Amino acid sequence: MAPRPKTFLLCHGAWTGAWAWKKMHPLMAQAGHRLVAPTYTGLGERAHLASPAIDLDAHIQDILNVIKYEDLGDIVLLGHSYGGMVATGVADRARERVMQLIYLDAFVPRDGQSLFDLNEGGREPMRKAAAAGDGYRIPRQPLPSDTPQADLDWLNARRVNMPIKCFETSLRLEHGEPAMPRSYIYCTRIPPGDVFGQFAKRTKSEDGWRYFELDASHSPNVTAPEALMGVLEKIVA
C-alpha cells in the first residue's frame, strides 16, 4: 500500500535557499508528496532584504508565516543543517500543525542554545570572518569535496553570505522538547571536524528518536537526491 501523500515543509541550511532543493521537487512529486520550500529573509532570492537585524527568530517567523498564509497542516517538517535550529523553533510554536520532524545532518538545539553553542570551534573564526567583511555576515563556507564540478558552479553562483546573528541567537522553547515523532538522518561521508556526529550519537541513544544513516556528504539534496528521497520515504511510510 502506497503511503498517504505528505506535505514536506523545508527549513533549509545556511548560505543557501529554497533554490538548492531544485532536484528534490520532481522526486517528491513522483512519490506523490508536496515539497513546500520557502527561502529565509536575507538569503537566495530574498538576499536584497539582508540586514544586521536578521536573526534566528526572523527565520523561524518566515516559516511560521508560510504555515499561516498557506494554511498548512499535517506537516512533515524537514530541517537541514542550520535549518535544524529553525525547524526546532517552528515545531515549538506550531505544534498543532506539525505531524513529524525530520533533521537532515542538522543541528538539534535544546532550550537556550545557539548554533555557536553547538559549534564552539566555529564561533571565533566565523566572527573574525564577518568582522573582516561587512561586519554582520559570515562568508560562504567551503562545500563538500565530493560535490561534482557542475553542481559546485551552480551552488557558488547562488550562495550568499549568512547573517551572523542567526548563529548567535539562543533558541527559546516555550513548550520544552518537541513532542511529535522525530527522526535524525546522519550523512556518513564525514568531513574533518565533523560537527553533526554529536547529534547522531544523541539521537541514536535518546528515547523518542528514529535514527537513519545516509551514504552521502552534507548536502544530499544536491549530491544524492534519489538516496535522500529513499530515506525520507522510509520515514514517512
Image (spheres, helix red, strand yellow):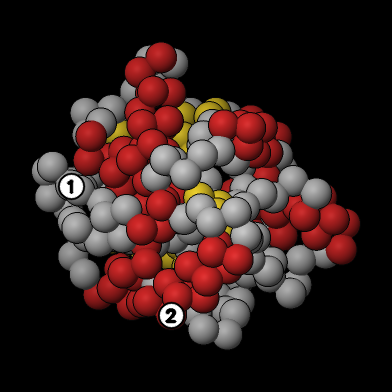
Amino acid at pointer 2 = Gly
Place of residue 40 in the rendered image (x, y in percent of width and height, measured from the top left): 51, 37
Place of residue 68 in the rendered image (x, y in percent of width and height, measured from the top left): 35, 18
At 54% from the left and 64% from the top, the residue drawn is 131
Instruction: Give the residue furthest to the right.
Output: 150
Residue bearing mark 2: 121
Q: Which type of secondary structure does the marked residue at label 2 adopt?
A: helix
Disc 2 crowd, CA 10 A, few/some/many (<14, 14-19, 20+): few
At 77% from the left and 55% from the top, the residue drawn is 156
Q: Quadrant of the C terminus?
A: top left
Viewed as shown, does residue 209 lie left or right of 18? left
Q: Nearer the viewer, residue 9 or 144?
A: 144
Viewed as shown, does residue 133 lie left or right of 83? right
At 75% from the left and 52% from the top, the residue drawn is 155
Q: Which type of secondary structure does the marked residue at label 1 adopt?
A: loop
The answer to whether residue 129 shows anywhere in this view is: yes
Viewed as shown, does residue 38 lie left or right of 158? left
Place of residue 94 in the rendered image (x, y in percent of width and height, measured from the top left): 25, 31
Amino acid at pointer 1 = Leu
In the rendered view, tell whether residue 23 sits above or below residue 208. Answer: above
At 69% from the left and 66% from the top, the residue drawn is 143
Q: Which of the two marks, 1 or 2, is nearer to us in this view?
A: 2
In the rendered view, tell whether residue 108 sits above or below residue 145. Answer: above
Viewed as shown, does residue 188 lie left or right of 66? right
Locate residue 45: give its quadrant: top right
Instruction: Give the residue furthest to the left.
Output: 175
Q: CA distance from mark 1 to mark 2?
A: 24 Å
Residue bearing mark 1: 173
Instruction: Give the residue furthest to the bottom.
Output: 192
How many callouts does the rendering have? 2
Locate residue 110: give its quadrant: bottom left
